[in-house]
Amino acid sequence: MTEPESRLGAPTVFHERRTYRRRRIMDAACVSPLLTLILWMIPMIWPQTGDGTVSSATALIYIFLVWAGIIVLTWGLSRLLADEVDDASNADT
Amino acid sequence: MSTLNLLVAVCTAYVCFLFLVAFVADRLALQGKKAWLRSPLIYTLSLSIYCTAWTFYGAVGSAARNGFEYLTIYLGPTLVMISWWWLLRKLIRIGRTQKITSIADLISSRYGKSSLLAAGVTILAVIGTTPYIALQLQSVTLSFSVFAGQTGGIDPQDKAGLALWLSLGLAVFTVLFGTRNLDAKERHDGVVMAIAVEAVVKLVALLSVGIFVVWGVSGGLTEALARIDASEFGEWHTDRGRWAGLIFLSAAAFLCLPRTFQVLVVENDDESHLRTASWAFPLYLCLISLFVVPIAVVGLDVMPEGANPDLFVLTVPLALGENGLAMLSFLGGFSSATSMVIVAAIALSTMVSNHIVMPIWLQLRPSGASVSGDVRNAVLMARRISIVGVVMLGYLYYRMSSGGEALASIGLVAFCGLAQVLPAFLGGMFWRGATRLGAIAGLTAGFAIWLYTLYLPSFGVGTILPVSIVENGLFGLSWLKPDALFGIRGMDQLMHALFWSMVFNVVSFVVVSLVTFPSPLERLQAAQFVNIFDHSASARSWSGGTAQTEDLMVMAQRILGAGEAQALFLRHARRQGVRGNLPAPTPDFLEALERELASSVGAATAHAMVGQITGGMAISVEDLMAVADETAQMLEYSARLKEQSEELSRTALELRNANQKLTRLSIQKDAFLSQISHELRTPMTSIRAFSEILRDTDQMTPDEQSRYASIIHDEAQRLTRLLDDLLDLSVVENGQVNLNLREGTLRDALDRAVSSAAIGEDGVRLEIERNPAKEEILLHTDLDRLSQVFINLIANARKYCDATSPRLLIRVMQDADRVVVDFQDNGSGIAPEAVDMIFEKFARVSDQKAGGAGLGLAICRQVMTRLGGSVDYVPAARGATFRVVLPYRTALAAQ
């Protein structure tokens, strides 16, 4: 059983929190390409001669792991942002 | 049956299958079963148009030659796709709202529907895409020759014939399914479906070869990875500049290539599909590129020295005796090539017909769009010819370049050329300050540098660019050498060209945008594009109302088709509430019509066509001023209306007041009548009573007799006075009074009035303040009447002043043309609501103090009017103040 005060207060707090989360999810969707770009630029600073060169197999695994990671991340974000997009496309038509 | 014949049979069967798929999809779409045809999955698969035969075969080749560099070609588009939220969503919304038909249309529409820009981008796209189409033809003929190589090879003549037949087949397919409907914005369901099927075929083919290589040849994932490490790949070696540069280039190309723009933006049916594609297409790219390195490594191991690594995808299974797999792989490559040619041809033909053919055609027809000729058929024909033209151009390019190695590098060269659109493209989407001239400048600079440093040299030294220029620079200036601009040498040729073209492109675009001023239409479009999510309303463009709807109807029918045009006009007529089928040519309607037309013939052409009929080519400052003027007129009109309504309400108020006054008068008249009858009856009653007493009483003392007789006499006198008053008023009112004009002083008149009125019957004396010296004014007037007025005023003061010790101030003032006499008492004055009544007949301030019949002031006012002056109540003063004004003429005459 909830007390009347908290019942009155809860929805607005909940709503604000939800709106806030939404905004941050949008931010994440904007930032994720930048993160990916940085991760994919890292091979540029790998040493190319001498000791410590990265083996091709490792390089391949690294790049594809980043790839898989960003696919999963984008999938998650696109699910979270589903309402925004669907609302917009419905409103448009 | 020879392998070659089998190959031809399989190809033919496959092409027939594609025709069938496209046909069935179109049929289903016509029947309205679009849900499945337009699913996010189909959209995602259709994006795979990015992966052409060049990537299908070339990726392995590139991996074998340059190691991991091939990955960049897939990383760039992945980055673009995961930027869906801030980039692609906006792009697609713009595309949908503005009914964009191609990348050239987008640029043109953003920069004030500029025909020049549209034509420029179109030419750039044709130059960039033609070699690409040639590349696809080459890849197909190469793969044919691989199979044929087993059975003795095919001669070059057959190769050329094959390429020709292939181009013709593709052109027919594209014409059949790509120009089914004119509305380029309408999805080509058949084509998209065929592309999606082909996307699956190429993915399955590449994955099959990869799985075969990893698990069939290498013996498992770990072994495959070990094999990679053991091969000449060994360690990570990548040109850092190329790694970054190629990621950028492929990302730019993904956005700017006509074919990817076509499927990404133009064929997009629902914004929410992007949500799926944002992760699904990167997944597709990831899978496509997953087995490239293992295939390359195994190919380098298995194949003899000097084998073309570009064909490892085919030759490795063939060499290992997997003919079925090789056939699948061949179909994958074939799919990549055909789908690219089909979509590129559709995209380019839309651009060419909308931005080059139609404007020229319209220019050549002086009569304009409204007179004769079926524009609809003309547009369709233009598009069909463009398709055939584009494909044949690719074929010619293939023949000219004789299918040499030079073609292999053309992919990146084309990417670099089309990337020149990027600054104007992104600048237009995110920067309101980007102007048409800026875009033209940027495009021109970037295009020129790309042409000089990359495209022309790509044909080989001495082919188009003379050897002298390559060795010594343009005009012999060494800092203008095409491979080392400004003397900076040592850069990779592609990166060199990309760097300088982009630098000059962006700098000219920004600088020229900063210093130029956009036209009003440009500024409107800029706001529309940049703030697309704020107002997804359509672009405003028409303000004139001079267009003839019938002409518009004629034109629209030719472009949209009769049924659709009539439906559109009818819809707008209903919306406007107009009877009949033709709506009024309002700006809203023109705008909507233009947008509809734009989806068929492109924004610039649609604007020009509507412009030819409406008479205004674009919104101008004059138009805006006219709009402003109209607004001002409306404001003025509404102000006038307001004024009128105020006047009306004022009149109504006056009428209401007058009515109230009349009602009050009527009530007072009734009250007066009852009063007067009462007044008449009271003396009559006492007269009758006392006369009866005198008549009937015998013993009466003379004293009593005389008292009763005098009462009768008094009452009779009172009656007489009352009747006199009434008579007097009616005489004065009717102007029948004779004025007895004579000379006298004001003081005499006042003296007389004061002596007769200052003391009432009840003996109460009114204190009167006077200034006799000022009263010495000679008058020539009816002094008796004047005295009567004064008496009335003094008597009123005496009767109605409510002060404990009533006092009356009589003040005489004299100015240039009149004499003013004020009678001011020290009472509380007259109530405001009674002020306008006191001069009316029968009016009395209160019933309680009913001393007279209420005729006094009415008589006063009539008398003063007759004397040429006035008597008024002065409301502002303290106490009750009456002001008598005598014209000076009256006074002067006396002096």
Image: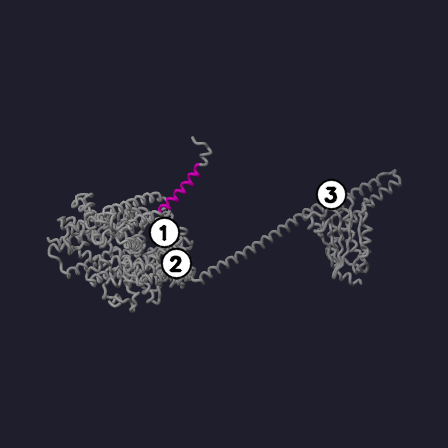
The subunit carrying tag 3 is B
Distance CA(mark 2)–CA(mark 3) = 88 Å
| Residue B341 horizontal/vertical position (percent) | 24, 56
Residue segment shown in magenta? A10-29
| Residue B679 horizontal/vertical position (percent) | 76, 45
| Of callouts 1 and 3, the N-terminal one | 1
Q: Are marks 2 and 3 on the same chain?
A: yes
| Of callouts 2 and 3, the N-terminal one | 2
Q: Secondary structure at mark 2?
A: loop
Residue B340, can we see it? yes
- Viewer-side residue, B675 vs B309: B309
Residue topped by disc 2? B434
Distance CA(mark 1)–CA(mark 2) = 17 Å
| Residue B148 horizontal/vertical position (percent) | 13, 55
- Viewer-side residue, B87 vs B611: B87
Of marks 1 and 3, the one in the foreground: 1
- Viewer-side residue, B310 vs B330: B310
Of marks 2 and 3, the one in the foreground: 2
Residue topped by disc 1? B90
Residue topped by disc 3? B848
- What colour scheme governs how the chains and residues are painted in the rendered image of this protein? one colour
| Residue B870 horizontal/vertical position (percent) | 73, 56
Residue closest to the far bottom: B475
* Residues packed near mark 1 inside 10 Å, few (<14), some (14 to 19) or many (20 plus): many
